[in-house]
Amino acid sequence: MTESIRRSGEYENPYQGEQQPTYPQQQHASSPVNPEWPPPPAQPPVQPPAQPVAAEGSGYDGYGGGGTAFLTAAPAAPAAPAAAPAPKKRTRGPLALLAAVAIVAAAIGGGTAYAFQELTGNDTVAAGSSTSTNVVPSSKKGDVATIAAAVSPSVVEVSATLSNGSSTGSGVIITSGGEIVTNNHVVSGATSIKVTTSGGKTYTAKVVGTDSKKDLALIKLENASGLKAATLGNSSGVQVGDTVVAIGSPEGLSGTVTSGIVSSLNRDVTVSTDEGQSQDQGQGGGDGRWPFSFGGQQFNGDTGSSTTTYKAIQTDASLNPGNSGGALIDATGNIIGINSAMYSASSQSSSGSSDAGSVGLGFAIPINTVKSDLATLRAGGSDS
């Protein structure tokens, strides 16, 4: 007797042992022959049942036979294809999110690394934010003694040997590896340069680049490391009346600190670009006063025919010969300018002595001008 396995939605074959009709599938559509058979389901299957397959080795020929079991392939679940994208989407979602986070983190990491490189290292500049960085504690803002203690290690004395004498000025350390910003007229025409730090250590320096049109120069100490770099601020935020501190080496007196206020802004100052002018300054080469002019008047001598004009910060902080190239500092300890020119009154008194000194008229190159010129200076300057 043939055993049949009836699955849900299937019916026994009423023609077992007899000749079967050509299309047995049509019997499913007619009413059951035996009233005892269960009625067909109210809803037919979504997909028609697959053709029966015989168990391996049964000799099944498609219509039943001795010892043969009816096996039908299970219909594919209709919801499977629709549900398949959902798990994939759920799987891809977190991965995509993690990838995005990784990319953002990498970008931030790269930006952080770049920022760190820009703020530290031997060949990078410590730059303040767009407003200011508190180099001194907020509670000590404007305190001259605190500012001087914090910034003095970043200001040096620059001594240049010239063909007919020497020149003494100042400079500001901008990298821990010994890059120093000073005035072009301090080192112009120098055959050798010596730099002395606030701690008394002396280095030999070489000129990296000069820009006579902005009266700027970049020099580099030899075999220097671990120096304290100054923090360069933002000169566009400077206002008339702001407290300022000047540090430099007037008359070779290194580490001299004076204070005052910003007395004017955007002052057109004209200075000489003639290298020969530097031969007339410093110890052994003149009175050390750098000639300049503004407002149509000449100060400290004749600037000559080759000149350049830049916008300067005017201050009444006492500046004297030797302050050139030194630091002009704001109340929070940021460098906002490089001192470049000062008016020194000189007259012969009745006793025969010469009176020379600051009368509260000094000028500094805005630090934003310096920062925008650094790449040029590092490449050799505009005069190369």
Image: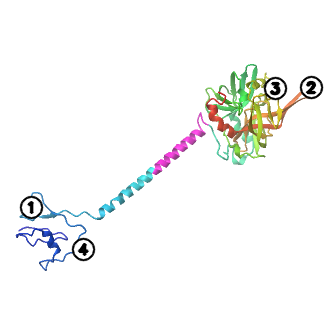
In the image, which residues are magenta? 100-124
Marks 1 and 3, the one that precedes in the sequence = 1
Q: Amino acid at mark 2?
A: Gly
Q: Position of residue 161 (x, y in %)?
A: 72, 22
**Residue 261, picture quadrant:** top right
Q: Is residue 343 among the parts visible in the rendering?
A: yes
| Mark 3 to mark 2 CA distance (whole Å) | 17 Å
Indicate which disc residue 349 carries. Answer: none
Task: Find disc 1 in the rendering and name its residue.
Answer: 61
Q: CA distance from mark 1 to mark 2?
A: 137 Å
Marked residue nearer the N-terminal end (2 or 4): 4
Q: Residue 43: which numbered mark, if any?
A: 4
Callout 3 secondary element: loop
Q: Earlier in the sequence, mark 4 or mark 1?
A: 4
Q: CA distance from mark 1 to mark 3?
A: 122 Å
Residue 352, numbered circle: 2
